[in-house]
Amino acid sequence: MKTYQGLRETYKQFIYHGFEISEEPGKVCLTYDFEIPGLSSFAPCWEIPCERENLGEDGTFLNMVFSLGMVELVSYWKTACPKEVIVEPWGLSEEQVKWWKRLYFNGLGEFYYTNGIEENEEDFMDIKALGEIWRPEKDAMRAKAEKNVRCQGAAEDSLPHKESGGCLVPVGGGKDSSVSLEILREQKDNNCCYIINPRGATIDSAKAAGYEEKQVIAVKRTLDANMLQLNKEGYLNGHTPFSAIVAFSATITAYLHGLTYIVLSNESSANESTVKDSYVNHQYSKSFQFEKDFHEYEKEYLGSGTYYFSLLRPLSEFQIAAFFAGIPAYHDVFKSCNAGSKENIWCGRCSKCLFVWLILSPFLTQERLAEIFGANMAENPGMEAYFKQLIGLSKEKPFECVGSRDEINAAIALTIRDYPKEKELPYLFRLYKELGCYEENLPACEAYFSYYDHENLLPEAFEDKFVAELKKRGVYRD
């Protein structure tokens, strides 16, 4: 493994040279040009389905493509972490530079932590943008903003329709995006699913929600082979803010397809740090802080006319699991195990699989969960270390997209409380009682049914329908 300081002394610059756009039948292709002088060049690519032409003459589109490059570059920068980042194709204001540094620093929190690197937001990087600053036309921005927020005072039934462009719903193949698709089912004729590098679970989830093939916008993202080789050779590697990639690429896609709302499925639980009492959060780019930051950045610097928000932000993972348990059409198709993603399976041995098992346990039987996961995880002593991390007995949660410590404890306590008395508790639940956690957490296990995080960006018309659906499903009681 190379050392952080050694690499920074050897490779002092990262250069974002620019990007190329090529229009092909039915799609637009983007190729970026990055370089760490003396080490490697990088040319990651995107292919986005699109029927529009002459995109090179569209300043808004060009600015969004440039901005996607700004978030894409951090995956390549992290191989050597050069102190200076030179941005050649476009200019950035002082406020924009601060915005990007905040995203990079917080989005790389896990990367720094797991690599044993101590840094601060001010000093880890210097960004020098050499091009001309591009700003959206203020009059056009104002008109687009009015279009986006007009729903704030709208009637209860005024959800997106063809005149307002409908919704683009990113689908990851897990339970969260499935719940969003189900909540928006009545409006699906005007919506599209957004999928990066489709796999079985993402396509199958869209089908389960009733989306036709023409309503699935599948984009292709290709990582540069030079970066992958450097990772093998021991250059620095680690987690980057992928959901920021989703935000910028989905905005381009919604803009190209005339869709107004970009509807994420990030929950309130994503705000909790992965490492106790620190800023390190595996899910930083799923947090409300990033959602709000991106929402404001789009209005000020992109001007795409889209409205980015997370439909599930008011909820906990506990409530999402309760909702998901009531939509069985998705149970045999959803997958969110990173270890098994290439094979489209649950591996049944990782912390992510265990988290999903535990959070669903109050709402599905252990037998049904074993059918879904292909193994009885609650009876596996090999899961004990992950189990203790998830319930908060260690400083770190697993570095995965998992729920908060409190709601995991609530789910386990509720499962034990309601477990059939004539059956022996599975191993992990017996362990939980032996550790004295059951009595400690039982009093709070019902609290999540009345949980609602009011720090959210839901437009009023969405929120009214949303709350009504939650109450109907029994996952929210005000």
Image: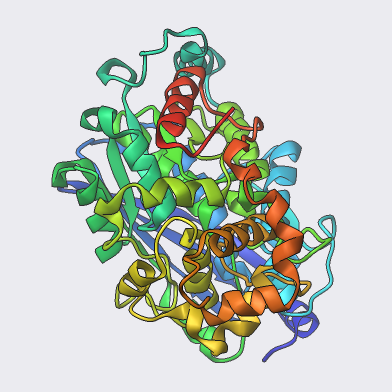
Residue 337 sits above or below residue 233 on the image: above
**Picture quarter with the N terminus:** bottom right
**Picture quarter with the C terminus:** top right
Q: Residue at x 23, y 36 (%)?
A: 53
Residue 429 lies in what quarter of the image? Answer: bottom right
Drawn side of residue 261 relative to residue 110, left or right = left
Residue 343 sits above or below residue 284 on the image: below
Residue 80 visible within the image = no
Q: Residue at x 48, y 27 (%)?
A: 467
Residue 74 lies in what quarter of the image? Answer: bottom right
Residue 97 sits above or below residue 191 on the image: below
Taking the view exactly as shown, the residue that stands out farthest to the front is 422
Drawn side of residue 204 relative to residue 311, left or right = left
Viewer-proximal residue among 186 and 380: 380
Total marks in image:
0
Q: Residue at x 46, y 42 (%)?
A: 264
Residue 122 visible within the image = yes
Q: Position of residue 165 (x, y in %)?
A: 31, 24
Q: Position of residue 40 (x, y in %)?
A: 54, 78
Q: How is the image coloured?
A: rainbow
Q: Position of residue 261 (x, y in %)?
A: 41, 30
Q: Position of residue 120 (x, y in %)?
A: 84, 61
Viewer-proximal residue among 69 and 295: 295
Drawn side of residue 6 relative to residue 31, left or right = right
